[in-house]
Every structure is written in structure tokens, then in C-alpha cells.
Image (cartoon, rainbow, N blue to C red):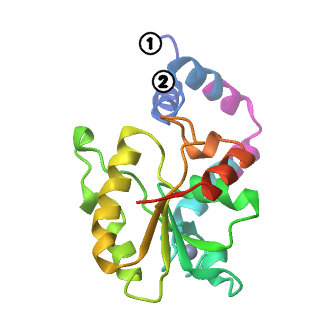
Amino acid sequence: MDLYSGHINRLIEELSNLPGIGNKSAQRLAFYLIGLPKDRVGHLAETIVQARDNVRYCEQCCTLTDQEFCPVCANRNRDARTIMVVENSRDLAAYEKTGKYEGVYHVLHGAISPMLGIGPDDIRLKELMARLQGDVKEVIIATNSSLEGETTAMYISKLIKPTGIRVTRIASGVPVGGDLEYIDEITLLRALEGRTEL
Ligand code: ZN
């Protein structure tokens, strides 16, 4: 595509590599950015670099945070003996928005997918198992109800069963193939309340 200058083409290409951004959106964004005042572009670029440099994984639950421990893990009023396992930090945020869950979380950063070559060692499972050495009474598996999410739930439940810790799975109020982050709060709460033993 040589319709635009090399710089614009490079910007369009970078933007179109972002998730959910097709070539058309990338072009629109590129021209929008180029049209912005210079200081606003500088501020945006700086914000991206700052976020990338300063965000880290919570020492306990592995979610993305600015501190050693995320706000949930740092909150002494949370029930640290109940751990909800989610695929990513966005799912954690979805459950936090309900304001009704009192336990803590564990963020896997992915799900097992033999098809994509993602195995148990590629997600934060070791960290979860290490946490179970402590005082834990229930692990609620809230991975998505996709094939990968179900595979991961089964795998985790098999690992935990021998420890004697209660393992539950959120109910199927969550639509099949549904991403937790797009589901409304009432459905999320219903799924949590209707969880079943694994
Ligand atoms: Zn945490």
C-alpha cells in the first residue's frame, strides 16, 4: 500500500496489529492521531510507555497492578481462604464490579489450549498450586465456558482434588463460549451463587 507516506503506512501497520483493530479502523486511528496537536500525541505515547514500564503482576494473585500486592490481596477484609480462578485481569474486574464477591482471586493469564499449543506451564498454574499450600477452603473455577475454559477447569479440578480442598465451577448462567468480561453483573452473580461441586 503506497497510497500514503512510509511513516503513515508504518503507523497503520502497527495499529492494525492491535487486537480488534482491522485495517480500516487502523487507517482511521492513524489519521486521527496525525491530526492531533503534537503535545497530545506526546502525552499519549508517554502514557503507553509509563503503563508498560510500571505495571507488574501481583505477588499473590498474579493480576496486573502497580503495587507489590493488588488492592484485593492487600485488603484484609477479604476472605483469603476462598480463591476464584479467572483467565485474565479483565474477568477479575468484571467480578469486582458486582461488589458482592468477598473472596480473593487467582489470574491465570490464559487458558489451556492444545490446539494453540498452550499447555499448563504456559499459564499461572504453578503459582495457584503454591497458594494452596496455605489455608484455603474453596477454589471457585470461573474460567470462560469456551472449550479452552472448560479444559482448563477440568485440568485444575483434577490437580486440586487430591488436596481435599473444595473445588467448584461457576454455573452455566454464563453463555457457552461467552467471555466473562462482556456478561452483565446479575448473570455473573447468579453464576457464582449457582456454582457446583467438581
Ligand atoms: Zn492480588
Mark 1, residue position:
2
Q: Nearer the viewer, residue 151 or 56?
A: 151
Q: Position of residue 64 (x, y in %)?
A: 54, 65
- Amino acid residing under circle 2: Asn
Query: For the stretch drawn in magenta, what is the main secondary structure?
Result: helix
Does 120 lie within the magenta span? no
Say which quarter of the image contains residue 68.
bottom right
Residue range highlighted in magenta: 30-43
Residue 198 got which mark? none
Q: Position of residue 90 (x, y in %)?
A: 59, 53
User: Is 27 located above or below residue 70 in the figure?
Assistant: above
Mark 2, residue position:
9
User: Is 97 located above or below residue 128 in the figure?
Assistant: above
Residue placed at 47% from the left, 89% from the top?
135
Q: Position of residue 148 (x, y in %)?
A: 36, 44
In the image: residue 165, left or right of residue 32 = left
Marks 2 and 1, the one that precedes in the sequence: 1
Q: Is mark 1 within 8 Å of ligand 1?
A: no
Where does ligand 1 appear, by image quarter?
bottom right
Q: Are marks 2 and 1 in contact (CB under 8 Å)?
A: yes
Q: Position of residue 41 (x, y in %)?
A: 69, 44
